[in-house]
Amino acid sequence: MKRTLIACPNLSLDRTMRVERAFLGNVHRSIESDVRGGGKGVNVARALKCMGRDALVAGFSAGRTGHAVLSLLEDEGIDTIATGANGETRSCLTVLSEAPPTVFNESGPDIEDDAWERFESTVTEQLDGAGIFAFSGSLPPGAPAESAARLIDRARARGCTTICDTSRAYLEVALAAGPDLVKPNLSEALALMGEHGVESMDVPPNALERAREAADALRALGPKTVIVTVGSAGVVYATEDETRAVPSPKVEVVNPVGAGDCFVAGLILELASGASLHEAALTGVAMGAAGCETFPAGLVDPARVRELRALLKG
Ligand SMILES: Nc1ncnc2c1ncn2[C@@H]1O[C@H](COP(=O)(O)OP(=O)(O)OP(=O)(O)O)[C@@H](O)[C@H]1O
Ligand SMILES: [Mg+2]
């Protein structure tokens, strides 16, 4: 089976912490804490690894934090190829309490001079022999707006199936590059349609209906398939032939951050073995739900994925 290559430019040192209650302006003491290498593409690779499938992650590494991230990833057995950048790799913090999660994300190292070109060549070298190319997550400051689009062009030219999960201007430009699949969440999709809200974990009323409209509208801009994820409500996918919702099973949520990345890992698993888009969406939904049940982002229990997948018949 061909390799999966994941561009995750904005690697991070991810800390997940549970506190009793969270209030701005207070000192908090953690009752549970986890630290590991992160970034959305790393979460995808982690979820794939849980399911027994390896992937190669490409990202920027900067400063001491970059070194720490690379050694944590090595310890975890996640293959990573790093491009050096000035400054410091970012740190991200997820605080879990009684309320929905609170997330603090640094923006990332400055991408100056020829750093982006070096990253692009590193990724391009790895594209030969890759079956699936995924572009995942945010971009460090200074990356060109067409970052994702350029890599998608290159991957497509080498015959890869291309998946894009980024947001804002990067997603807007990437749509026109015609990737095989884009996966915004509902608020990312609505933002592209001019509706800017706060990025929250709440599911708005009529979420699946709005996701349906958004998926159709974004598909008209270039991608073959658009899948809009809507947290606990599930997903809506739009292709040339149909627009269809797949509801999510109910789960006890421990940490919903990274559910979208687990969903993408589920898609990759199925698409790599030639399954239909509908099968891929079902496995993605099972993986997204299973990802909510674990404390660190991107971690899934494979037995639980199979159990949840079995609940989602056809
Ligand atoms: N609370 C939940 N209960 C069940 N399934 C969920 C829940 N939250 C997410 N999922 C599943 O995971 C998928 C992706 O979740 P979501 O829409 O939150 O992605 P996201 O915002 O891209 O997440 P992230 O960017 O943190 O990875 C959902 O479409 C759904 O199938
Ligand atoms: Mg997401």
Image (cartoon, rainbow, N blue to C red):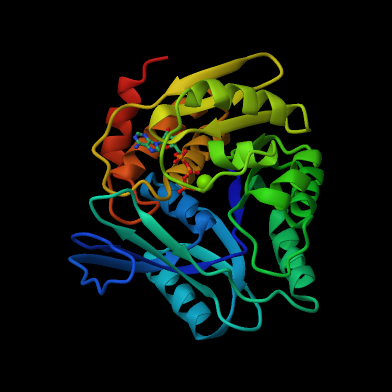
Q: Position of residue 240 (x, y in %)?
A: 71, 18
| 111 vs 72, nearest the viewer | 111
In the image, what residue occupies the spot 64% across and 67% down? 140
Q: Quadrant of residue 121?
A: bottom right
Does the image show residue 293? yes
| 199 vs 67, nearest the viewer | 199
- Say if 303 sits above or below 167 in the image: above
**In the displayed structure image, the side of residue 172 where residue 295 appears, left or right:** left
In the image, what residue occupies the spot 38% across and 65% down? 76
Q: Position of residue 48 (x, y in %)?
A: 44, 47
- Quadrant location, the C terminus: top left
Q: Quadrant of residue 211?
A: top right
- Say if 114 sits above or below 222 in the image: below
**In the displayed structure image, the side of residue 255 where residue 224 appears, left or right:** right
- Quadrant location, the N terminus: top right
In the image, what residue occupies the spot 64% across and 30% down? 226
Q: How many marks?
A: 0
- Say if 25 sits above or below 8 in the image: below
- Say if 16 sits above or below 3 in the image: below
Q: Position of residue 58 (x, y in %)?
A: 61, 63
**In the displayed structure image, the side of residue 294 where residue 43 appears, left or right:** right
Does the image show residue 129? no
In the image, what residue occupies the spot 69% across and 39% down? 194
Outermost residue on the front side: it is: 25
Q: Position of residue 155 (x, y in %)?
A: 75, 48
